[in-house]
Amino acid sequence: MLHKTATAGKLVWSYTTSGDVDFEIVRRDAGKEMAIWPKITVTSLKLPEYGNKMVTPGEYILKFTNPTNTWFPAKVNCAAEVFNV
């Protein structure tokens, strides 16, 4: 999931998943990616995972990766938005 912002603000997200996923947030600048939220492995079967982070103008990517080597997919429902503060 990609978010671009022209002003500083607060990036807010919420997601649920049907299995284990690796989650991280990176900022892309001039083709380089820098982690602004560390990669963590989460299972969120019943309750949503949510959080927020103050961000500067730029391009931000919420990355979800299935860490298992199986054919079973992990379904992810996600919403994210940048709010001006």
Image (cartoon, rainbow, N blue to C red):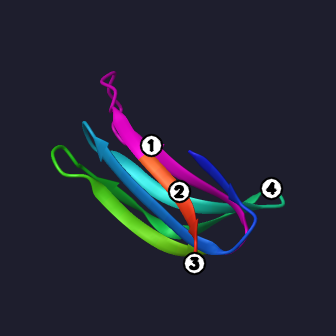
Distance Cα–Cα, label 3 vs label 1: 30 Å
> Nearest the camera: 80 or 75?
80
Identify residue for label 1: 65
> Nearest the camera: 38 or 44?
44
Query: Which label is found at residue 10?
Result: none
Which residue type does callout 1 highlight?
Thr
The answer to which of marks 3 and 1 sits earlier in the sequence is 1
Distance Cα–Cα, label 4 vs label 1: 20 Å
Q: Are marks 2 and 1 in contact (CB under 8 Å)?
A: no
Q: Quadrant of residue 7?
A: bottom right
Q: Quadrant of residue 70?
A: top left
Identify residue for label 3: 85
4 vs 2, front mark? 2
Q: Quadrant of residue 50?
A: bottom left
Q: Is residue 16 above or below residue 34?
A: above
Q: Position of residue 30 (x, y in %)?
A: 84, 60
Which residue type does callout 2 highlight?
Glu
Query: Which label is found at residue 81?
Result: 2
In magenta segment, residue 68 = yes
